[in-house]
Image (cartoon, grey):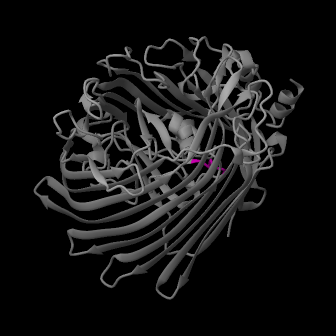
Amino acid sequence: MERQRSVIGALGGVVLLCAAGSAFPNDLPEIAVHAPASTMESTPTPGTLAPARLLDLEAPGAPQALDQLLVEQGWATWDAANSLGLAQGLQVRGFTLSNQGSSQLQATRNLLNGHADIAWRFARDPATLEYARLLGGHDATLLGAGSPGGTLMLGTKAPTGQPFTRASLRASDQVGWRGTLDAERQLGPLQIRAVLAGQWHDRTTEGVRDDRHALLLSTRLPLSGGGHLQWDLEKHVNRMPFPFGTAYAGGQFWLDHAYVDTTRARADRQAWRQALYLKKPLGEHLTLSGHWQAAHTQREETLVGFFNVKNATQLNSYLRDIDERYRQRDAGLQLDGHWQAGDWRHDWSLALGTHRERRDFAGPQNIGGFVLDTRHPVYPPDLSAFTLANRYSFEHLSDSGLGAAWRGQVGAWDFRVGVRQSRLRIRGASRPDAELLPTAQANPLTHAFGLGYTLGPAGRVWLARTQSYLPNRGQFADGAWLPASQARQWEAGWAWPAAPTAQPTSVAASAVVPPTIAVTAFDLQRSNLAVPDPQHADAYLLRGTQRSRGVEAHTSFGTGPLRWTISGTWMRPRITQTASPGTPGDYLAGVADRFASLRVQAPVPAALGLPSTQAWLRLTGSSSRPGDARASFRAPGWGVIDAGLQGQWPGQQKLHWGLQITNLTDRRYVRALTGPDNVWQGPERRLQLWIDMAW
């Protein structure tokens, strides 16, 4: 308690934290649950129909993880794929938004500069990004980019045409350091921008070391007659052994020990990307854009830890050597045009794109070769004594398509239509000497339409329907290929004021912040869920539909010196048909029905001697989540408090500083789960200091 009081006191007058913190005890029993016993960037057409949810990546002291920022703003909640810390995997509207949330290849739905981002086993550093927009169905689906629940549209930093230098440094109380450098220079007509980011000696809650480094070099050459040619070179290095989650045993979650042998587990993930971009006006009303990208990742790991619960006091071991290679190629052309015909303004886009992936995985493993005692876990000194069974996976994916989109505006009306014809092929093998054979073939046609109307002072309303797809693997018993899983979404909303706005996460106290409100109702359904055919080995059936209905709300406003931002989602995600005969239940494991975020900011009184300083408080929360399809047990809901100070150095407008405390009350909580054997806890309390300077 004395430590908590001293931390709160460091905030210098933010007295409301004391009252808020007392509502959240930090003892272990608060997250005990009762489970059954077990032994085991830009949109295709100008503007967006709905308000764009823009992440403020340039705010001083911004988080070092993109998914963390999405959760803190109340736009998404943690997903088990994301909780591994290996990529952006989140729950949006009840559906997983992930670049690597599956053991199979699939067309990614995280888009970078208008094409697919690198999809496999690495975490992108947000320091390399200029913007991040989380779009619902409609605007992202116009040219086939959509996925159930939403699409994360990312844009890398590019030359601005103005020389500058900006650097930041962050240190935490757990001996973690992070530094970034962002600079631009001009060499004749060539504009050059470089971004460096590094993170050293950081550790996860389980004690696993998490080191990350990133480099982005972007050059741009203006072309005569307008437009430019841009070349990007990027490299990311992640060193964090794969965490295993938290075991559930003896009637409570096992939180007090590391679940990985941190002395011998190792990881080395590297990602390289180079890309070429062209933008060229072809006249007053026509623009040609093109992109080409080549990327690959490499993953080498030795994983030593536990796999699942053996009994109430023992855990089965997990030992694996992983060697994984992933390659990706993207290319595309897009033609954009516009014209005015009387009172009508027309904007249109025509886009042709190809996306190819290749994954080679080798992961010899041994599960259950030894056991760990939950009270005194001791790993064997000689791991070479355990034989490893071979496990391989080789897969190729090709996804290409032609899309067209149109937007028409007349008076207060806004009409949008989009369609894309795609061609999807996946081939795979499970042995190094085996021929790659087809595992999926589909030719899905997706579409989107939307209608918006401006009510004047009363704001704006819209209605949209979208359709997107994800691959299905395998065949029916008669040999026919499974069709792609189809997702359709209806969305209706109201926003005030009428013009879409994106409020930054940090606003000066003297700034006038106009109030904003946006409410969106959605009904999202994904059909063609594949399950094994009980009558035929190696065949599948289509049975089950995942449906999520709910409401999203966002508002920002000011009351006196206080600035408020509130976001929340209320939904009912369910399986509307039984997924398979032997597994009754309609709940989605690990998916919350409600999650939200509240942030308040106020100036620090001048009497405290901190000029131009803001204090802020954020509460992020989630409802309980079912642990299995029958909701026979649940992880309890949680509310986590973060707080901090940020300001300018006296007399130095380009020098910012900040103090931030995440999980202020040191609350122990379940961040994500997929069952009693796979539970991830949230981070412990962390104190961070940062400084941001520009010249």
The answer to whether residue 669 is above or below residue 208 is above
Residue 587, percent from left and from top = 41, 18
The answer to whether residue 205 is above or below residue 653 is above
Q: What stretch is highlighted in magenta?
A: 61-65
Q: Nearer the viewer, residue 490 or 487?
A: 487
Residue 634, percent from left and from top = 54, 16
Residue 654 in magenta stretch: no
Q: Nearer the viewer, residue 469 or 249?
A: 249
Q: Is residue 152 visible?
A: yes
Q: Quadrant of residue 181?
A: bottom right
Quarter of the image with the N terminus is top right
Q: Nearer the viewer, residue 215 or 675?
A: 675
Q: Which of 304 and 54 is in front in this view?
A: 304
Residue 268, percent from left and from top = 62, 57
Secondary structure mostly seen in the magenta stretch: loop
The answer to whether residue 31 is above or below residue 615 is above
Q: Judge from the rendering whether residue 59 lies leftward or rightward of residue 48; answer left or right.
A: right
Q: Quadrant of residue 484?
A: top left
Residue 11, percent from left and from top = 79, 37
Q: In which quarter of the image is residue 312?
A: top right
**Residue under the image location 43 percent in, 50 percent down:** 393
**Residue under the image location 20 percent in, 64 percent down:** 337
